[in-house]
Every structure is written in structure tokens, then in C-alpha cells.
Amino acid sequence: MSGFLDDMAESSAARVREASRRESLAALELRARAAARGAPLRLSAAGFDVIAELKLRSPAAGLLGAATSDWLGRIAAYARGGAAAVSVLTEPSRFDGSMEHLRQASSVLAPLGVPAMRKDFLVDPYQVVEARAAGAGGVLVIVRMLSCARIAELLDAAADHGLFVLLEAFDAADLTVARELLGRRRRDETVLIGINSRDLQTLTVVQERFEALAPLLPAQWPCVAESGVATPFDARSMRRHGYRLALIGTALMSSDDPAALLSEILAAARTVGG
């Protein structure tokens, strides 16, 4: 792992220990199963979708300015603009996220038929159940952070609670692990494969990674371009390379009219022959 992911994993594990002291897994399971279910992930027949992101702070870009003042309104704008899901950061130390953000976002999105996805550096199935209890419809799982056995446990927890999973890879080795893991899974699980173009050492975007890894994308799983997609042109390029979705954070958080930008991005990508 990179130093950044090591730090995030340690912090995440500490949060699990603290949370489990307050509430046992058995109690959390009961609360999760009693919670209202988040909207299911539905992908458009038009061939391209966006997971829009709520991100109050970025380690690369810093505090995302005035966009944070009415973040619940911004989430509703994402839904109006056509987002298939909304990724909500819950990591507190580097992204200013919280589980309360996820709970509030899920409440806003549920009547609009859009699922919230917990985006964090998950290291334990307990955190998947936390997401379900907060009303989320999906979770992010980072391949490089975890052993195959632990990834399988997180996938099991997500499937048990009806959550979709965005399984994130950074390189060909990560993709190989993801393909091997998913080859053993039930076909009725909802799993997306993500390619993150961010260099974890410098936190800069390596846009070329999307094209370089495109030939290795598994055709049977919808693939997501993460980081570095900011414009309609970028989205069209991702569609041409075989990506079915893009996860977009900073560009939407920085936009004065995120619904309009999202609509433009979707319209541009959907004009590319799939």
C-alpha cells in the first residue's frame, strides 16, 4: 500500500474499534435491518451514468469553498441533474466527512429514487453494516487496502444487506484481484469496477491510466472512471474507452450549477455509440 492508504487504513480501523465499543455488531445488525432501505442502483439504458460526489474537503484541492454551505441542496441538485448515485465521504480526518452526512444525504435522496454510497477507507464488515443503518444503498471497497479474504467478507456483508459495491482498482494487478474475486461471486450481486486515476503518492491525476487499463476492463461488470473526469469532453472520452460510469467529485462540488453541469456531462457521453 501507499503511505496515504496505510494512514487511512489505520485511522479507519481505529474508528471501527471506537464505534464497536459504543454499539456491538449484533446491535448494529438489528438497527440496520430495521432501517429504511436505500434506493437501488439503476443504470440508464442510454449507456452512461454518473456517480456524483459530496466531498467537503479534498487532500489534493483543500476545502471546497462555498459549495459546502448548502451541501444538502447540492445533493438534491445532483439528483435533478440525473445522477445514478451520490457518493458521500464519511472519512473525517482528511475529507471532513461523517456518518451524519451519510444519514442526511440518504434521507434527502431516498424520495428521489437515488441511492447514497458510503465512500470511505473501509477495513471491516462492521462499516458496511454502519452504511446500511445510515440508509446507504452502496459502499466503496478499495482492493489495494485489503486481503482477498477481507474483501470477500466486505462483499458478503454488502450482499447480505442488499448494497451495491464499487470495487476500486488502481492498476492491472488490482484488476486481476478484482476479477478473481468476482469470478467466485453470485451473478445477482450488484458490483461496479472502478479505476482510480489518482497517484496515491503525489495525489495528482494520471489521466493516461484510464486508456492504458481500458483493454483489461472486465466486460461483464460495469466499469467506473474515478478522478479526473470534469467536463463533457472527459466523459465522452471515458465512454469511448469502455467506461460505463464516471465518479465526479471536485468539478461538481466547485460548480455554481451542478445540476446543469451534470446534465451536460451525461448528454455528451450518451451521444457516443456504445
Image: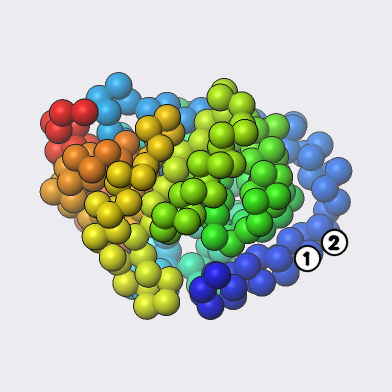
Image-based side of 139 in relation to 24, left or right: left
Camera-nearest residue between 43 and 147: 147
Q: Tag 1, which secondary structure?
A: helix
Q: Amino acid at mark 2?
A: Arg
Q: Quadrant of the C terminus?
A: top left
Do we see residue 163 in this rendering? Answer: yes
Which residue is at the front of the view, 237 or 177? 177
**Residue at x-position 49% and y-position 54%:** 174
Q: Residues within 10 Å of mark 1 (few under 14, many from 20)?
A: few
Q: Position of residue 223 (x, y in %)?
A: 38, 40
49 vs 273, nearest the viewer: 273
Q: Residue at x 37, y 32 (%)?
A: 219
Q: In terms of secondary structure, where does tag 2 sit?
A: helix
Residue 259 in the image: above or below residue 188: below
Structural crowding at the residue carrying mark 2, measured as other residues with C-alpha within 10 Å and reported as few (<14), some (14–19) or many (≥20): few
Return the x and y of residue 101 as percentages of the image width and height.
54, 54
Q: Is residue 111 left or right of residue 160?
A: left
Q: Is residue 104 above or below residue 81?
A: below
Q: Which residue is mark 1?
A: 18
Q: Are circles 1 and 2 on residues that touch, CB within 8 Å?
A: yes
The image quadrant that residue 5 belongs to is: bottom right
The amino acid type found where label 1 is placed reads Glu
How far, Cα to Cα, is label 1 from label 2? 5 Å
Query: Which residue has dot 2 on it?
Result: 21
Way the structure is coloured: rainbow
Residue 130 visible, this angle: no
Q: Quadrant of the N terminus?
A: bottom right
Residue at 63% across / 58% down in the picture? 146
